[in-house]
Amino acid sequence: MPRLRELFNALRLPSGKGGSISAKQLRELLLVQLVFAAAHSLGWVLFVPWIFKMGFTQLDFIMYSLVLWALTIPMLLVKRKPRASKAMALGLFGRALAFFVAINLFSRYQLFIIAALISWIIVEFWVSFNTVYERKAPKKDRAFLNSVMMVIHPLSGTILPVVAGLVALHLGFEYALFAGGVLMLLAGVVALRIKGLGRIELDPAKAFRHMRKAEPFIFIQGFWEGIEYTAVPLVTLSLVATFFDYAWFFAYLGLVGAIAAIIFGRLSDVLHARVKFAAFLTVMMGIFSIAAGLSWDYLSWAVFIGLMSFCGHIVKPFLWTIVTDVSGRRVNEGMLVREYFLNTGRTLGVVVLLACFLFMSIKSAMLVAGAAMMLYPLVLFYEKGHKLKGLS
């Protein structure tokens, strides 16, 4: 709590010296992220059961995921220099449109339009937001501010999925979608009004050369995410009876993530053997992914996915550190390469999941995801030392 009071005291006094962010800009960026998280947790958490209710199938959702991740790859290869606040706002406005399109789904083309709009937010919003937040946050507060960022989404995901479930139960999920879209528009307006963030140079050729050391780590993480982000909603939906049951499951995962983020906040300042700790956690993620793929009922599925999520939320800041360590002052290049290889890995992950769905089962893909994540420590120790000093 004293550390939190320190931050609030700092926020009262705009500094902005040496290119660091002012207190006003920091408050606005945190507000954007908070509203974004609320919109997503309220309006999107039930998207999978919603599209099933609209007559779509498991294969439709898998293809939607494939299009979503794959479309980002060519878009991220375009050399440009966008204004940060404008790029963030455009991404958020596109994301809001995806909410509104989802209210009345009657065609697969609409599903793919939604996928394209979400690809757009990855390219426009996340690269710009992460670059500005990481590059301009005061150095002495950066680790703490990153832990604040890590806890925002799990906390909103603890409460708002239940609200979404109640709305779906008593009014209809289209009302939650509409509310999420309005919140996303609000986040876009706030982002557009942030002054002084400047432009971000995005040159893929330069970025790939500079970030070569981090690319294997990012790709493995993306491959795992591509399978897990697609398989977990589908398998969970096959195990629950109602929208509300599905919402409770993701509220439970949000609570697990919030607890993990708080634990990391306490560990980050005292932990010294970061490489060994990160390696241990990635192995545990792999083990729990495999265990979830072999689960036999709803309870075992919930336990193993909860443990996997717990480890994932604790290790996520360490995986982030790899990117920032390699990028150094060229954070813009780090964030561009991060999104490129995350989404390349996710695309391949969904291709593997599609093959498992067609010839075996969705759960079998989780065995592959777990095995891939267990390769992470091998790469981590190979690159340890002078190449990745931030994790030493």
Image (spheres, grey):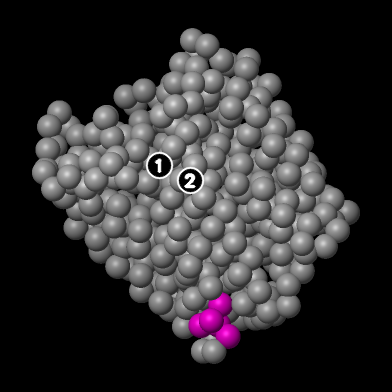
- Would you say 251 lies left or right of 21 here? right
Q: Is residue 59 visible?
A: no
- Is residue 166 shown in magenta? yes
| Residue 235 percent coordinates (x, y) | 75, 62
Q: Is residue 310 magenta?
A: no
Q: Residue at x 61, y 81 (%)?
A: 106
Mark 2–mark 1 CB contact (< 8 Å)? yes
Percent coordinates x, y for residue 71 in the rendering:
55, 51
The label shown at residue 147 is: 1
Quarter containing the N terminus: top left
Q: Which residues are magenta?
A: 165-169
Q: Secondary structure at mark 1?
A: helix
Label 2 SS: helix
Q: Is residue 215 above or below residue 121?
A: above
Count up the numbered dots.
2
Residue nearest the observer in this picture, 262 or 32: 262
What amino acid is labelled 1 in the image? Ser
Q: Earlier in the sequence, mark 2 or mark 1?
A: 1
Going by the image, does 24 lie left or right of 358?
Answer: left
Left or right: residue 213 compared with residue 33: right
Q: Residues within 10 Å of mark 2 (few under 14, many from 20)?
A: many
The dot on residue 261 is 2
Q: Residue at x 80, y 50 (%)?
A: 293
Q: For residue 319, say whether it is visible.
A: yes
| Cα distance in 3D space between marks 2 and 1 | 7 Å
**Main secondary structure found in the magenta portion:** helix
